[in-house]
């Protein structure tokens, strides 16, 4: 049965048990007399199913309480719908994930729930871009995946994979990050790539490449998700001390100042070869595509709720 146009469909993606955080969110919503229905994901695999359920039940405002990966699932569900359906739906976020990079770009902060809800209530909408990777998977199926923030190819995707594995074993977010950085020393540090960007062809060993429609976890800090362009940061081989110097510049927002970082801006990238390089999409591991793949941008395709 269809719901009122003003009623929010809220998908809650808990961190840990999460019951106190959910109660706090509901309290803030009730104080502001927001009409809403809550659904909660049991795992990352259930996010897409629940977003589809909310869409097909007629909710016009979808709010994701989660991080970049949950937002990624939501936009990929929306992009399966016809344009006339998408155009009637606005997507919002209450940051509650391991990585909240896209939310932070808009100044939505995890510790400022009241301000976030006040902004969402004002329902200020901006159409934002989506990047898209088109590839062939290991089953030789033609696939595509959209992204709001960024794609990482190579070392950073490998670190994200190590961090996920470490966190599943250790539980601690901070400890898993430290362990993954340490384990990085023993992993492959560069990958043979052949990439076409605009009129340039890069055919050499590359440590990591970030393609961002958004800030890219600091690797594409000049990217904006509404200009119809992708920012690319490609990092060539560097010594171990320079790797840690690069991590420091990344943490302090000066990543493009590193001498091994080579930036580009483009509408499309063709990766003709990237042997053994893992691919991460909005913080979630995609795996290793088979053969060449293409990454492009689709301008202003999702209605996103932004601050006042």
Image (cartoon, helix red, strand yellow):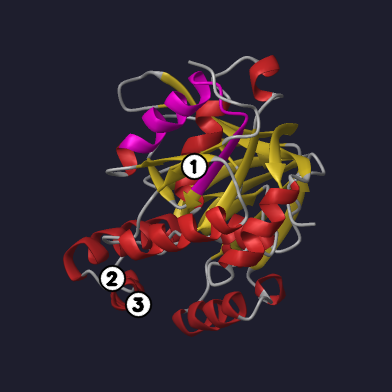
Which residue is under mark 1? 10
Dividing the picture into quadrants, the one containing residue 44 is top left
Image location of residue 210, percent across then percent down:
58, 54
CA distance separating discs 2 and 1 = 42 Å
Q: What separation in Å lies between label 3 and label 2 (alpha carbons)?
A: 20 Å
Query: With respect to residue 35, does 241 lie above or below?
Result: below
The part of the chain drawn in magenta is 46-64
Depth check: give the residue in front, 177 or 69.
Answer: 69
Residue 72 left/right relative to 222: left
N-terminal of the pair, mark 3 or mark 1, is: 1
Sequence order check, earlier mark of 2 and 1: 1
Mark 1, Cα crowd under 10 Å, few <14 / some 14-19 / many 20+, is many
x and y percent of residue 286 in the render? Answer: 40, 41
Question: Mark 2 Cα within 10 Å, few/some/many (few <14, many 20+)?
Answer: few
Q: Secondary structure at mark 2?
A: loop
**Labelled disc at residue 27:** none
Residue 190 relative to residue 295: left or right: left
Q: On the image, numbered disc 3 is attached to which residue?
A: 174
| Pick the front one: 187 or 120 | 120
Mark 3 vs 2, N-terminal side: 3
Q: Which residue is mark 2?
A: 186
Query: Residue at (73%, 40%) from the top-left corner?
Result: 128
Does 154 appear in magenta? no
């Amino acid at each position: 049965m269809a719901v009122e146009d003003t009623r929010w469909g809220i998908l809650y993606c808990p961190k840990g048990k999460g019951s106190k955080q959910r109660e706090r969110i509901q309290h803030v919503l009730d104080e502001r007399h927001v009409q809403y229905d809550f659904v909660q994901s049991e795992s990352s695999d259930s996010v897409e199913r629940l977003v589809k359920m909310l869409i097909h039940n007629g909710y016009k405002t979808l709010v994701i309480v989660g991080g970049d990966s949950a937002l990624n699932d939501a936009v990929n569900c929306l992009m399966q719908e016809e344009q006339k359906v998408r155009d009637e739906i606005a997507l919002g976020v209450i940051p509650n994930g391991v990585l909240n990079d896209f939310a932070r770009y808009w100044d939505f902060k995890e510790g400022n729930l009241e301000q976030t809800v006040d902004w969402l209530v004002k329902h200020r909408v901006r159409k934002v871009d989506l990047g898209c990777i088109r590839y062939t998977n290991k089953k030789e199926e033609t696939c595509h995946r959209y992204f709001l923030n960024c794609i990482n190819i190579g070392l950073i995707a490998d670190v994200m994979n190590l961090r996920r594995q470490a966190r599943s074993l250790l539980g601690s977010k901070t400890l898993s990050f430290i362990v993954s950085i340490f384990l990085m020393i023993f992993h492959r540090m560069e990958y043979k790539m052949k990439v076409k960007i605009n009129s340039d062809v890069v055919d050499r060993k590359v440590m990591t490449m970030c393609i961002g429609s958004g800030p890219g976890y600091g690797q594409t800090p000049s990217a904006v998700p509404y200009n119809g362009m992708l920012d690319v940061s490609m990092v060539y081989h560097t010594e171990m001390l320079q790797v840690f110097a690069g991590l420091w510049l990344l943490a302090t927002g000066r990543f493009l100042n590193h001498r091994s970082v080579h930036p580009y801006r483009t509408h499309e990238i063709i990766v003709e070869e990237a042997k053994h390089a893992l691919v991460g999409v909005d913080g979630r591991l995609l795996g290793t595509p088979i053969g060449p793949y293409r990454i492009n941008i689709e301008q202003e395709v999702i209605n996103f709720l932004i601050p006042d």
